[in-house]
Image (spheres, helix red, strand yellow):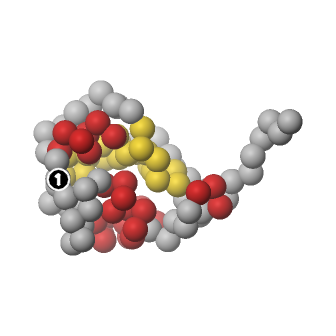
Amino acid sequence: MKTEIRANWSHALLVCKKCQKRAKASFGPEGDRSLAKALKRRLPAGKGRKARLGVVEVPCLDICPKKGVVLIDTRHPDRWQIVRENADIDRLAEDLSA
């Protein structure tokens, strides 16, 4: 039985699932319901473990900002971001992919 599985991820983006639900916001021009879906669509990520990076929805991170979603880039675990509902998703995706 395998105990390790190889993935091509260089890093992951952790998005609070509860914040997305509470915000009831649409992210991006297509009106995606969740920040995770909007980021997956705009980042050159690919699918599954063979992608260059992963976008993962995680349970509550206990920050709970009003009208915002908490996002953690695993390259910088000491800096958590709050993405507001009116954020420019294309610019955010560009910053996160750099």
Q: Amino acid at mark 1?
A: Ala
Task: Please identify the quarter of the rendering in which residue 43 is found.
Answer: bottom left
Task: Please identify the quarter of the rendering in which residue 62 is found.
Answer: top left
Secondary structure under the numbered disc 1 in the rendered image: loop
| Depth check, front residue: 75 or 9 | 9
Q: Residue at x 17, y 53 (%)?
A: 25
- Taking the image as shown, residue 8 lies to the left or right of residue 90, namely right
Instruction: Name the residue furthest right.
Output: 1
Q: Quadrant of the N terminus?
A: top right
| Depth check, front residue: 97 or 49 | 49
How far from the left and from the top, in percent, is residue 51?
60, 63
Whether residue 95 is visible to the viewer of this picture, yes or no, is: no
| Depth check, front residue: 28 or 90 | 28
Whether residue 38 is visible to the viewer of this picture, yes or no, is: yes
- Taking the image as shown, residue 83 lies to the left or right of residue 14, namely left
Q: Residue at x 21, y 72 (%)?
A: 29
Instruction: Read off the residue under disc 1.
Output: 25
Instruction: Name the residue furthest top.
Output: 62
- Taking the image as shown, residue 12 lies to the left or right of residue 64, namely right
Task: Please identify the quarter of the rendering in which residue 66 is found.
Answer: top left
| Depth check, front residue: 22 or 52 | 22
Q: Residue at x 52, y 65 (%)?
A: 45
How far from the left and from the top, in percent, is residue 53?
55, 59
How far from the left and from the top, in percent, is residue 16?
34, 40
Task: Please tell me how crowded label 1 is: few (under 14), some (14-19), or many (20+) other residues with Cα within 10 Å.
Answer: many
Q: Is residue 80 above or below residue 25?
A: above
Q: Is residue 23 above or below residue 11?
A: above
How far from the left and from the top, in percent, is residue 17?
33, 40
Q: Residue at x 31, y 47 (%)?
A: 81
